[in-house]
Image (tube, rainbow, N blue to C red):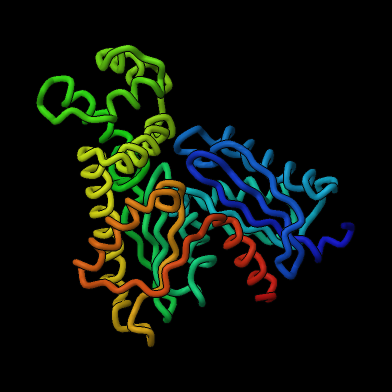
């Protein structure tokens, strides 16, 4: 691995973890490495940069090689839409990898690259956060959502986890039906009664990822037929469908595909791992008159970063 022209790095920096893929110029994966959250708006830039460094070093170690120069580096970072965000990450990369061509994109662009046949259509991420990103055949771009857990992220793991917490407290008060989520949430944090959640949730340091960690409990309760859990997932599906419909409308994609549908890549642990949520999303998006076809589950968005790095070199 001494020829830098033969190596590229693709990174998916999400709200919970970072994955770096070391690949050759043909896109064959040589090593995988993981780090922490790379979204500096959640953890601060020093921690985000450390997550990137850790993931890259681990990818080289997995390939059995020392860290060395590469031909191109593409980073898809959650929350990096604004020019100032891209400048910040680009400056870090320029210092860490002098002379290496670097591309910094939103993580949803990775899903678009990995989950659509030609890079046009829509990409939906529903993990800790949520965002929809789209590209028209003429290169126009649009997005919806992804504004963080305070101002947005509807249909995300955070939103579902928050809804679960609210459902537990409403049931405790007698304002909502009893739900299996009460026992599930209390067991998750080893608590005795719903009022104990006050100290757990409002203690210093709890973040979106910890709230989002409750989302799988909602999926399990839905599988068990819990009506409250099913309602939560149905609402999440409606919010995600609304965001997709907004992007399709902005780009006029309804008339762009010869298949009669809009290519769609789906990514993020919440929607990839929950058939209940996917079904609710697809039902709702159809009600908006949007036909998604083909639909691809993207389990490793970092593959999209590798594709984009290849395109930087004119390889794909």
Query: Can residue 135 be seen at all in this image of the molecule?
Result: no
| Residue under the image location 57 percent in, 55 percent down | 300
Compared to 54, does 291 lie above or below?
below
Q: Nearer the viewer, residue 184 or 155?
A: 184
Q: Residue 16 vs residue 98: left or right?
A: left
Residue 111, given in percent of the width and then of the height, sits at: 49, 61
Give the residue at the far left of this rendering: 175
Q: Is residue 248 left or right of residue 178?
A: right
Q: Quadrant of residue 181?
A: top left
Is there any visible trace of residue 219 in the rendered image? yes
Q: Residue at x 29, y 33 (%)?
A: 162
Q: Position of residue 315 (x, y in %)?
A: 69, 75
Q: How many marks?
A: 0
Q: Residue furthest right?
A: 2
Q: Residue at x 27, y 25 (%)?
A: 182
Residue 136, given in percent of the width and then of the height, sits at 39, 76
Q: Quadrant of the N terminus?
A: bottom right
Q: Is residue 63 left or right of residue 166?
A: right
Q: Nearer the viewer, residue 86 or 230?
A: 230
Question: Residue sitting at 30 percent across and 42 percent down?
Answer: 222
The C terminus - image quarter? bottom right
């Amino acid at each position: 691995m001494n020829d830098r022209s033969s190596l590229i790095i693709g990174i998916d920096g999400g709200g919970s973890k970072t994955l770096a893929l070391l690949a050759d110029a043909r896109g064959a994966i040589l090593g995988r490495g993981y780090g922490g959250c790379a979204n500096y708006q959640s953890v601060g830039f020093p921690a985000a940069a450390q997550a990137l460094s850790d993931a890259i070093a681990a990818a080289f170690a997995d390939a059995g090689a020392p860290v060395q120069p590469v031909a191109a580096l593409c980073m898809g970072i959650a929350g990096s839409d604004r020019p100032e965000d891209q400048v910040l990450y680009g400056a870090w990369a320029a210092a860490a990898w002098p002379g290496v061509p670097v591309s910094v994109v939103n993580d949803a662009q990775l899903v678009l690259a990995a989950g659509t046949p030609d890079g046009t259509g829509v990409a939906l991420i529903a993990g800790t956060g949520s965002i929809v990103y789209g590209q028209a055949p003429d290169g126009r771009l649009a997005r919806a959502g992804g504004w963080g857990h305070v101002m947005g992220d509807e249909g995300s793991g955070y939103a579902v986890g928050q809804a679960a917490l609210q459902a537990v407290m409403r049931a405790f008060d007698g304002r909502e039906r009893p739900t299996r989520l009460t026992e599930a949430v209390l067991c998750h944090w080893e608590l005795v009664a719903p009022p104990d959640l006050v100290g757990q949730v409002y203690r210093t340091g709890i973040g979106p990822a910890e709230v989002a960690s409750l989302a799988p409990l909602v999926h399990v309760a839905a599988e068990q037929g819990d009506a409250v859990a099913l309602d939560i997932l149905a609402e999440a599906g409606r919010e995600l469908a609304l965001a997709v419909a907004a992007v399709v409308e902005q780009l006029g994609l309804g008339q762009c595909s010869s298949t009669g549908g809009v290519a769609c890549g789906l990514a993020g642990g919440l929607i990839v791992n929950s058939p209940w949520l996917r079904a609710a999303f697809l039902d709702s998006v159809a009600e908006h008159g949007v036909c998604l076809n083909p639909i691809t589950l993207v389990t490793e968005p970092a593959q999209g970063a590798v594709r984009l790095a290849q395109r930087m070199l004119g390889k794909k």
